[in-house]
Every structure is written in structure tokens, then in C-alpha cells.
Amino acid sequence: MPNKNLTLLVVDDDDGHRNTLRTLLGSWGYTILVAADGRSAVEAARAQPFDLILMDLRMPDLNGIEAMQDILSYNPSIPVVIMTAYSDVETAVAALKAGAYDYLTKPLDFDELKLTLDRALDHATLRQENTSLKKTLAGQDSPILGKSEVTRRLLEMVDTIAPSEATVLITGDSGTGKELVARLLHQKSGRAAGPFVTVNCAALSETLLESELFGHEKGAFTGADKVREGRFRAADGGSIFLDEIGEMPLPMQAKLLRAIQEREIQRVGGDRPIKVDVRIIAATNRDLQAEVEEGRFRQDLFYRLNVVSLHLPSLRERSGDVPVLADHFLRLFAEKNGKRVKGFTPGAMDRLLKHTWPGNVRELENTVERAVVLLVGDYVSERELPPALLPPVTNDSHSSRDWGEMTLDEIERAAVREVLQTTGGNKSEAARRLGITRKTLLSKLRQEE
């Protein structure tokens, strides 16, 4: 039974049809208000919020598409389902392009009506939850965004270990946000007022890495024309983040171990120890225990680094965070590119949720930035997503073409044909798998004829 707190607006200039729908939908548990024309619908939608609008296409003065566009211009979150005569299917397709959630042909199939309303309201509920979540996240001081249980536990762990002086080893796949977590540990520690210094251990050769970490004396090697302090000294009183620690050469590992044990360093070419007060946070995407067993990483250094370990889950393990992260990146890149972007279409968000994200949060960030750059309208759709996120096409007519060369309409038609083929021509099952109504599927097939 639908939630009785949901309020629907039925708009139809046919008194009999309007009253029939009011009675039917009321019996399904919805609260129903009605309007006899498009202008009355616009006024009603401005006067109070609705969870869904069921609107007739053909009405005098202001038709259904015009009324819908007026309503969506100031409240794009309201799902609008258009009702139309069979002869107006082409116009109804235009309504979908203008922002309608779906359309139904008269005389209405009540089972199909119920299914369409359920789906539309599910989308609306998800959007409202995300909006509420955005407001909550807007006030939080954590750069780690998400609402999943995995993320909640991660943030609780950060809060627990941040105030300590313990060395922390952060593990996780590339792109999971290890540096963000390291910065958060620093910000929540007693060293927050001190410097936070980062070093990528994989980016430098052994000689350069030693000089980068510990500094060098003037004349220590060719080109050393002055004393260099090094990153450990720069981090004095704060934290140093050693990223990709698993890439550090073995000889350098021994020198780092001494620095950790003695809390002192020695510049390249120098002969006196220099005391340093730093907290060490290291990160790797490698299995350091396995590296130790293979002889590529010192066991004693591993123990020194692994005082407290923090594993970052991959994005596929926290898929519930995808809408939050995607929305965050959308707003970030919309502002950066000077664009007014309202959000994602349900189809685009569905693709984001179904992707496995081998590149994790970094891949999601790049995907959203690309979409914003390519976007012409108000909502990011499947057209702006990279080919890797779209369903594969096996139809021979497209097998030799690159996804990037195909239009969204071509991709959609190929997907419809593929699903029909896998269902043995069963249109009802194909519509279910595609997440559309059977009549919507039929209209798409008629467009190909």
C-alpha cells in the first residue's frame, strides 16, 4: 500500500476522467488534489509541494508540456507523468525530452499506472534523501564524504586514533583517498597547528629521495650549492605523510627506520644528527606483509609503521556513497567551469551506481568532471558519461564502431535490440529489464520503423 503521506496532483480537463483518477488513486492510499487545467496546476504546484503530478497532455490555454516546464523551472525534483491519447505519442516523446518522467496512453491501463507511479515516487524519494544528506554534509568538517556504514566506521576510527602520537599505516587501492584521510588525521590531532608535509616515495630515485627527506649539506654532491633542510625538518612540530611507502628502495628503508626509532635525521653529506619532532603517517596500495615475505620490504620497518593500521575500502565496497560523492563533484566542477547544473538524470545515476569503479573515487571524480565539461543542458545524462559506464552493444551494425563515435539515441536503440534478443522477443520482460514501461518500449520500437 502506498504511503498515505504522499500527495499527488491530478491535472485533467475531462471532469469524468479526473474524478475517476481521484477515486482510484485515493483508494491506493494517496492524498489526491486535482486541477482542471494547466494554469491551475501551475498555481497549485506553487502553493504547496507535491510528490508527483499526473498531467493530461491536451488542455486548453496551457497544455501539459507548457505547464510541466513552468513547474519544473522552479522545482525540477517533482516527477511528472504525462497522459496522452495514442495518436499523440510523438508529442509525448517530446514531453520526455522536456523533462517528464514518463507518459501513459489513454485509456489508462491501471496496472501500468500503478507501476509507473511506484517507480517515479521511488526516484523522487531517493532524490529527497540525497538533498537532505547534502544539507547535513554541508555542515560537516570532514573531507571524507559518504553515508554508508563502511564510511561511518572509517570516520569513527579516524576520530579514535587521530589524537594519539602513534604512527599510522594507511592501506587501500589507488584512488581511495589515502592522502585525504592522512590530512584528516593531522587536522584532528594535537599537531593541527603545525605543518602537514607530503612526500611521494615512488616519484624519486634513492639518492634524490634521501635528500628530499633528510636534506643535504652544501657540496654534498654535484649541484648541491647550498644547505637543504629536507621534508622531515619542514614537518617539525607537525606530521609527515609518506605516500607509496612500499616503493621505497631497501637501502633507504634502513635510513628511514633509524629516523623513526631515534627521532633524528642526518643530512646527506652531514656528520651530526638533527632531532625532529614529527608524527609519521604512511600509505601504500601494496600488501606490505607479502612484500616482507618476498624480501622487498624490511620487517622491522613494517612493524614500526604498522603501529595502527587503517584500511580504506574500495568504492565498490561503499557503493552507497556514490550519489553523495557524485553530487559533491558535480557542484565542485559546475562552479569551476561556470555552469549551472541541476543534477543527474535517473538513468545517469543508475549507470554510476552499477559501475565497479576500478579507479575508485579518483575515477568517479574524473568521470563527473568530464560530464560537466561536455554538458550542454541542466542535467547530466548518459550521453555525457564515458563509454566504459554504458551497456555493451553486441549488435553487428555497431560492432565495428567505437562507443565514443555513437550518439545516445544509437546506443539506446542498440541496447533495446540486445535486450529484446536476450528475452526472445518478450517485450514485457525486456521493458522490465530496461526499467521502462511496455508502452514506452513499444513507442521506441515504432520510432525505428
Image (tube, rainbow, N blue to C red):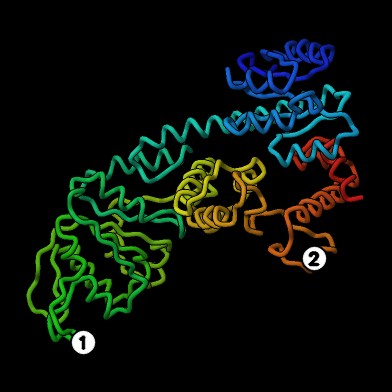
Q: Is residue 315 above or below residue 259?
A: above
**Residue at the location (80% across, 65% down)?**
399
What kind of element bears circle 1?
Answer: loop
Q: In this view of the protein, which residue sits in the foreground, 115 or 337?
A: 337
Image quarter (top left, top right, bottom left or bottom right) of the N terminus: top right
| Mark carried by residue 223 | 1
Instruction: Name which quarter of the figure residue 385 lies in.
Output: bottom right
Position of 250 with respect to 107 (left or right) is: left
Which residue sits at x=71%, y=34%?
Answer: 101
State the residue at coordinates (87%, 51%). 421
- Determine the residue located farthest toward the bottom in the rendered image: 222
Identified at 85% across, 36% down, the residue is 89
Mark 1–mark 2 distance (CA, rounded to whole Å): 57 Å
Residue 431 position in % (x across, y down):
81, 39
Answer above or below: position of 170 versus 73.
Answer: below
Image quadrant assignment for residue 170? bottom left
Q: How many marks?
A: 2
Crowd rating for badge 2 (residues with CA inside 10 Å; few <14, some 14–19, many 20+): few
- Circle 2 is placed at which residue position? 399
**In the image, what residue type sits under mark 2?**
Ser
Disc with the residue nearer the chain's start (1 vs 2) = 1
- x, y percentage for residue 264? 13, 66
Labelled disc at residue 138: none
Residue 423 located left or right of residue 259: right
